[in-house]
Amino acid sequence: MLNQPAIVRDDDLEILLNELYIRHGYDFSNYAKSSLKRRVNRLMAIDRHPSFAELIYHFRNDDDYFKRVVEGFTVNVTDMFRDPHTFNIIRNDIMPVLATHPVIRIWHAGCATGEEVYTMAILLEEARLLERSLLYATDLNPSAIETVRKGIYPLSQMKQYSENYILAGGRKDFSSYYKAMYGWAKFDDRLKSRMILATHNLVSDRSFNEFQLILCRNVLIYFNKVLQDRVLQLFDDSLEKLGYLVLGSKESIRYSAIATKYKQLNKEKIWRKEQ
Amino acid sequence: MAQGAVTSRLVVIGGSAGSLEILLNIISEMSPGTGTAYVVIIHRRNDSDSLLTKLMRTRTTLAVREVEDKEPLMPGTVYIAPPDYHLLLENERAFSLDTSEKVHYSRPSIDVTFESVANVFGPKAIAVLLSGANADGALGMELIKRAGGTTIAQDPSTAEVSFMPQQAINRNAADHVVEGGKIGHAITELLSH
């Protein structure tokens, strides 16, 4: 099981991070170390490496294994309508504002396996806005992006998602959005018809468009202050005036350089760009 | 408390089913000014957000905070793991949050935080495992004990649900097995040394 005691030491982690950067160009140096250590421990448990030396040996000698390490570093746990209250606010307060734009551009930054992108597609469809929306969904991890493309999620999650959907103000039968088959739920193709999927690294890649709404939930918690500031600047560069930024329930822009340009919606984790 | 104050000891308390009342009693017995920070991980439903924080504030003069991203760690404060996040210590001065896979069907998981406390605070940690119907926390107790910290399991015969503290005892991970009503006193004693 995954309950093995910690094996990775601080200097082991440094070795791995250095080699990932020097040999492959992935810079994890400004990620929170406590979470990264857990990711490496988890990878060693799953791949049955008895020691860190074993992992680094595979990493150095198998060109494909580095991809697995990168994928193992990213946390891909996400839900549909996670924090239903937030999506209720988006449904009631933000959708009417988005509706005033001829083309609606939304960016899900660090979308993982895409549950929130489908969440947003459902909200847009119910507001009759999906047709003129573009949902950009990006993540560092190519296999996560592949999952978004498929739109197939475990059926066992649907009860929870359905409850969340109703708490978020949904009035339809949630199961009308997917077809159940062999323990999986395949979401309707029309939901992904307006999605644009790509790998994008928040650490090193630049802004690529202007958006009215950016969602980046539970990604900043994995970054240190330096990287958080850089990423928030990237979002600021990518957000239209009066656009919205939505973060995770424990995240904030409060101590960042962009904070003065934004106004928080009550106590929600939603900020509106005012300048 | 001034920014950057040093936390000399860390008391970390984990509990699940049947642990709330005993937890509130323990916190109410903690006195300020010992240079100690308190960290609480309780399994609960995700929707009860700030309720536990409010409840705890009625029982103690210590500051009570539900942890936010990169929250600084200060003595004289009770920190509560937020629902649906694992709570980690980034170092002796700051927390970090993590939404990765559940452990023992739980997020926050007691094992995850205990392991992190063992790494960062080692011998300066005191861990307490209370009532619960889950195996979460037993491994964490072992890791804290191995790192030189002190561990207390609630006496299972005094726990509403005996399973969780019993798991730690079976693992030989409990330095002390203490009746529920006397755990606050036991912590105070340990902190006075």
Image (cartoon, coloured by chain):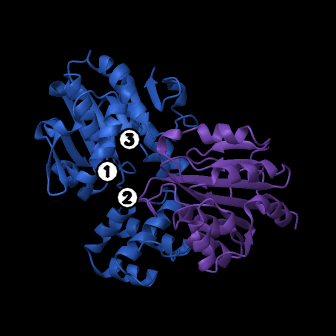
Q: Identify residue for label 3.
A: A82
Q: Let me know if residue B91 appears in the view.
A: no
Task: Kindly state the secondary structure of the residue where label 2 is placed.
Answer: loop
Q: Position of residue A169 (x, y in %)?
A: 33, 27
Task: Kindly state the secondary structure of the residue where label 3 is placed.
Answer: loop
Quadrant housing the N terminus of chain A: bottom left
Q: Nearer the viewer, residue A143 or A203?
A: A143
Is residue B135 found left or right of A160 in the rendered image? right
Q: Are marks 3 and 1 in contact (CB under 8 Å)?
A: no
Disc 1 residue type?
Ala
Q: Residue at x 34, y 29 (%)?
A: A213
Q: Nearer the viewer, residue A254 or A126?
A: A126
Query: Toward which corner of the image does residue B163 lie, by quadrant?
Result: bottom right
Which chain is represented by purple in the image?
B
Q: Are marks 1 and 2 in contact (CB under 8 Å)?
A: yes
- Who comes first in sequence, dot 3 or dot 1? 3
Q: Identify residue for label 1.
A: A112
Q: Let me know if residue B18 appears in the view.
A: yes
Up/down of A192 relative to A264, above or below: below
Depth check, mark 3 against mark 2: the one in front is 3
**Which residue appears farthest toward the top when viewing the image?**
A100
Q: Position of residue B193 (x, y in %)?
A: 87, 68
Q: Position of residue A44 (x, y in %)?
A: 40, 76
